[in-house]
Amino acid sequence: MTISFDATGAIVVGTDLSDRARHAVDWAADRAADLKRRLIVVLALPEVPIPSRSRLFDAMGKGNYPEHLRALALERLQALLDRVREQHPDLQVETMLDKGLASYVLAQSSKVADMVVVGARGANAPMKVRALGGTADAVVAYGHGPIAVVTDHGTPTAGGPVVVGLDDSPEAEAALRIAVTEAVRLEVPVRAVHAWDLTPWMVGPMGVSSLMALPDTEKLAERINDIVEPYRKQYPALTIDVDVVEARPSAALVEASVGASVVVVGSRGLGGFTGLLLGSTSKEVLRDAACPVIVTRAPEVAKH
């Protein structure tokens, strides 16, 4: 099964026409306008729509319920399109009504899109749905390129830094490239965070304290600075700060997300420094961050 539209080079944002999805559409529209990218707003309807219990009798009275649902969806998509065009008159934007599972449609579009954006439930949602919700969770898990998740509590702070989780892994380097793009776009600094957890270093192979094995934070900072230095040279007006902290990576990134514009993190858990953990983390950060989160993959990972 293939999707019915060409997402090549576009910013694709999923919507279910809810208030939560509206925040994701607004975020995606701002980014598309700034970067002069095409924006595609996608609504996926199930192949066989089943009305909710509260709408069952209404659906029975409509005769052809799927067609009724499609017409209603097109009407609401047009209203959404009009609102986006009013906010961004020069933006190339289109809506797409597709059939199928929303997570599948969005994950497939991520193979060629510049970025896929999806809304999700966050910290204020009941615990049983705090793992982003089915669609966002699946798109992050099976997406092929950068996936931005805008939760119902993830509000960007105007003028706040772009936070990026960083080590020397290919995924973290991909995250850094996106973080720099976002920072230049927003005209804000980058804050590169490398967190190492003390716990694995406290216990040796015989269960004995092994404090002599603690990492040298100054050397770690030097290595992180070496990674960001090419970007400092390429963008001399851009400020890139490096923080090496002792903390669980997810906790460090969630803390750094307060007052940030966006957090960028690699999708995998193990970092490139031997024995150190950057974090996969990604799910915890996605769930608890106080701003939108972009999850990215290294190019060779994105192909699989």
Image (spheres, rainbow, N blue to C red):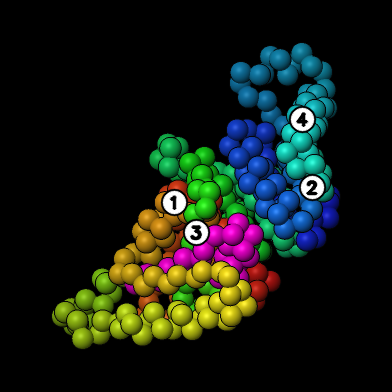
Residue 190 within the segment the image draws in magenta: yes
Residue 220 within the segment the image draws in magenta: no
- Distance CA(mark 3)–CA(mark 4): 33 Å
Residue 177: image tag: none
| Residue 121 in sight from this viewpoint | no
Q: Is mark 4 on a helix, strand or loop?
A: helix
Q: Front-most of 28 and 130?
A: 28
Residue 42 lies, with reference to residue 6, above or below; the image says above
Residue 259: image tag: 1
Kindly identify the residue that appears in the image at 65 percent across and 74 percent down: 299
- Distance CA(mark 2)–CA(mark 3): 25 Å
Pointers 3 and 1 in contact (C-beta within 8 Å):
yes
Q: Image check: 201 left or right of 110?
A: left
Report x, y in % for residue 56. 67, 18
Q: What stretch is highlighted in magenta?
A: 175-196
Residue at the far front in the pictured view? 237
Image quadrant in which the C terminus is located: bottom right
User: Disc 4 marks which residue?
Assistant: 79
User: Disc 3 marks which residue?
Assistant: 161
Kindly identify the residue that appears in the image at 69 percent across and 14 percent down: 57
Q: Front-most of 238 and 214?
A: 238
- Amino acid carrying label 3: it is Pro
Residue 22 lies, with reference to residue 33, above or below; the image says above
Q: Is mark 2 on a helix, strand or loop?
A: loop
